[in-house]
Image (spheres, rainbow, N blue to C red):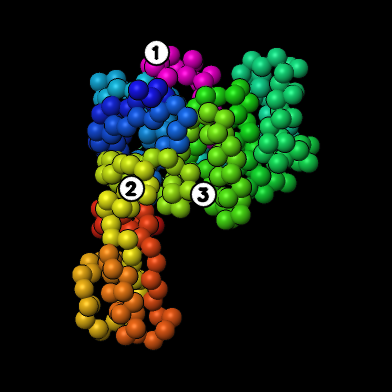
Amino acid sequence: MPEMAILVEGVNKYYKNFQALKNVSFSVQKGECYGLLGPNGAGKTTMMKILYGRVFHSPSQGKISIFGLDPHKQSLEIRFLTGIVPQDDNLDYELSVEENLAIYSRYYGLARKYALSRIEELLDFMDLSDKRKANIRELSGGMKRRLIIARALLHSPKLLILDEPTTGLDPQVRHHIWDKLRILLREGVTILLTTHYMDEAFQIADRLMILHEGEKIAEGKPSELIQSHIEPYVYEIPQKKASSCQPSGYVRIEKSGEMIRYYAHDITVLQHLAECVPPGTGFIRQANLEDVFLKLTGRELHE
Ligand code: ATP
């Protein structure tokens, strides 16, 4: 039986009359990377903030345990086992890169000598050593993100919680951060992350939940979610330019925004459709998590 890092059972969350989370349950095993995938407003940040005690959650509205601890009664113990990478940039702009880390090391009560070597180690790990004296204003968006991750790792947490770790960053920086997260996973750190990027969820989550309007609508390994919910091939084309040919076999059609998507098990059926329009008008690709989301909700992740 795998050991649990996080257990969430039947959690509801209301902001006045608005229900932001509806009976959400999931569990994360130690050493696993679990993702919450959903569009803006799905309830991802609310779930994260409940877990790290930033949003009040009544115990009568579900059960939560982190490493067997109750966030209501043992929030301090949980804080020392957990590193938080919030969505907002909450760095101290009056301080340099290394001072930002030093101040947190004091918050965690790290002995001065140990703190200095840990800061060195983390600056190196996040490729920020040459920026140690820099002011936060001099850092790029990617560097700030890496510094926030370094800061969350100072006390060697067993669980790292990241809220949209790569939103707004360019593809190269995103891959760099994913590489670092993979190293942490290999070292046994448990990771919980939220994202609205299906490629991020696919790249690093061992398992994920798709969250829509506060509700869990699917859960599983990324590749299994695609296999179990969707046909493997998609032909995507602007509706105005859609093929007038009759499909030669089974296709399922989804219209969304300006696009029409034909889903099929047999790629040759899609190739036949594509031959009826001028080359380069549409394209055939493999199905992905975005398609799963579209099928389950009738909406796109980034509408
Ligand atoms: P994003 O990716 O934009 O951060 P999200 O999936 O993290 O979205 P949440 O921030 O958890 O979503 O918000 C879920 C819903 O709860 C939204 O409709 C939001 O407007 C609402 N909400 C969040 N915080 C509050 C609050 N403090 N008071 C009232 N409503 C809130």
Image: 260 above or below 94: below
Q: Give the image location of residue 222, x and y in percent.
A: 38, 47
Query: Could you tell me which residue is drawn at 32 percent across and 48 percent down?
Result: 225
Q: Quick one: 243 or 53, which is closer to the camera?
A: 243
User: Which quadrant holds the N terminus?
Assistant: top left
Q: Are marks 3 and 1 in contact (CB under 8 Å)?
A: no
Q: CA distance from mark 3 to mark 2?
A: 25 Å
Is disc 2 placed on a helix, strand or loop? helix
> How many numbered marks, from 0 up?
3
Asked whether 56 falls inside the magenta stretch, the response is: no
- Is residue 258 at all visible to an observer of this figure? no
Provide the residue span drawn in magenta. 66-85
Q: Are marks 3 and 2 in contact (CB under 8 Å)?
A: no
Disc 1 designates what residue?
73
Q: Give the image location of residue 182, x and y in percent.
A: 55, 39
Query: Could you tell me which residue is drawn at 26 percent across and 53 percent down?
Result: 229
Q: Give the image location of residue 263, x and y in percent.
A: 28, 66
Is disc 1 placed on a helix, strand or loop? loop
Query: Could you tell me which residue is drawn at 59 percent across and 44 percent down?
Result: 179
Q: Give the image location of residue 210, x and y in percent.
A: 33, 45
The answer to whether 6 appears left or right of 144 in the picture is: left
Picture quadrant where residue 133 is located: top right
Q: CA distance from mark 1 to mark 2?
A: 37 Å
Disc 2 designates what residue?
224
Is label 3's Cβ within 8 Å of ligand 1? yes
Which residue type does callout 2 highlight?
Answer: Glu
Is disc 3 placed on a helix, strand or loop? loop
Which residue type does callout 3 highlight?
Answer: Thr
Disc 3 designates what residue?
167
